[in-house]
Amino acid sequence: MMRRPVALIALCAGLVLSTQALAAELPQRWVSAGGALSEWVSALGGEAHLVGVDTTSQHPESLKALPSVGYQRQLSAEGVLSLRPDVLVGTEEMGPPPVLAQIRKAGVRVELFSSKAELDAVDENLRHLGQLLGAEQQATALATGYRQQLDGLQAEVKQAQVGQKAPGVLLLVGHAGAKPLIAGQGTAGDWLLRQAGARNLAEHQGYKNFSSEALAALDPDVVVFSDRALADEQALQALLKENPALAASRAVREQRLVSLDPTLLVGGLGPRLPASLRTLAGAFYPAAKASFAQ
Ligand code: HEM
């Protein structure tokens, strides 16, 4: 009978020690590539671990002050290794593969996450990040809250569709206006359009270049444009200058042109999407704009 408390104390002490041992094994110095993924690291309280990020990791604003490892698709082993990280986190967009192999060979853990535009991928990414940060409960709470926000929005979109037909939309990702890539099926861009209640007029898989004539022929009701070099009005002017045929489309004639931050489209589905979806839905359903503006 007397032994029990002792055994219990020993058990508790053992648990505390093993939790501490686990914490000591968690990676301390992190490099993160892919905007949305870096945002989740921050949202889970991991920002203090970041010793470097790629150029698409621009949110929260404080990440811009960190050393840069260049563009996530074009990392260099020297750039990453010079920061002496314990772990490099990124999605399948991260590369090139030989550089990742070199980084692994140098003894740095490379942890891969999904950039798939699916809610299950968000759950899994959050679980995995939570484990690496020792923040499992926060990760579960974030995943639940995310689904709730999106479910709420879906109900409002359905409501808006009672009064207005879903608009036909194209999402263009440009580089100073030139050769825009059109977001097709399976992309984060397509997911965004559909979640915000649009019909994506592009039926191809992935991102693809279209001629400006082909773009105009699809005659979108709304064009969502995203440019990785220019912002808002400048991006729009460059797009119209490089793709003059677009001027004939309904979207341009009616000035239904919506700017989208390109960092929302990289590194998987990120934490700012529910808010961005509200802005998009408001542009797609003008009569219901006030309801989406919360
Ligand atoms: C903040 C956002 C982004 C930045 C800073 C950025 C930057 C870059 C840079 C510097 C390059 C390589 C050089 C070049 O072709 O000019 C590049 C290539 C590329 N980017 Fe991005 N990009 C961004 C967003 C995106 C988005 C949203 C997509 C999705 C469509 C994308 C897809 C690509 C692809 C497919 C390539 C070619 C990759 C290759 O040839 O290996 N980028 N980007």
Image: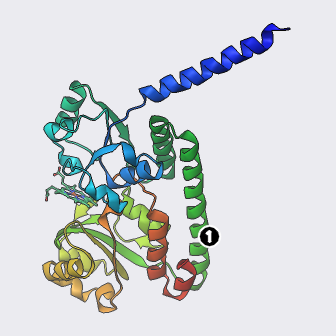
Residue 164, percent from left and from top = 54, 84
For the point 57% across and 63% down, the residue is 149
For the C terminus, the image quarter is bottom right
From the viewer's side, name the closer residue of 9 and 88: 9
Residue bearing the label numbered 1: 155
For the point 44% across and 27% down, the residue is 24
* Horizontal side of residue 136 vs 133, given as left or right: right
What's the colour scheme? rainbow
Q: Secondary structure at mark 1?
A: helix
* Horizontal side of residue 267 vs 280, given as left or right: left
Residue 53, percent from left and from top = 27, 49
Identify the image quadrant of residue 51. Answer: top left
The image quadrant where one finds ligand 1 is bottom left
Residue 265, percent from left and from top = 34, 60
Whether residue 43 can be seen here:
yes
From the viewer's side, name the closer residue of 232 and 170: 232
For the N terminus, the image quarter is top right
Residue 258, percent from left and from top = 35, 79
* Horizontal side of residue 272 vs 8, given as left or right: left
Could you tell me the amino acid type at mark 1? Answer: Ala
The relative height of residue 3 versus residue 245 in the rendered view (above or below) is above
The relative height of residue 114 versus residue 283 in the rendered view (above or below) is above
Q: Residues within 10 Å of mark 1 (few under 14, many from 20)?
A: few
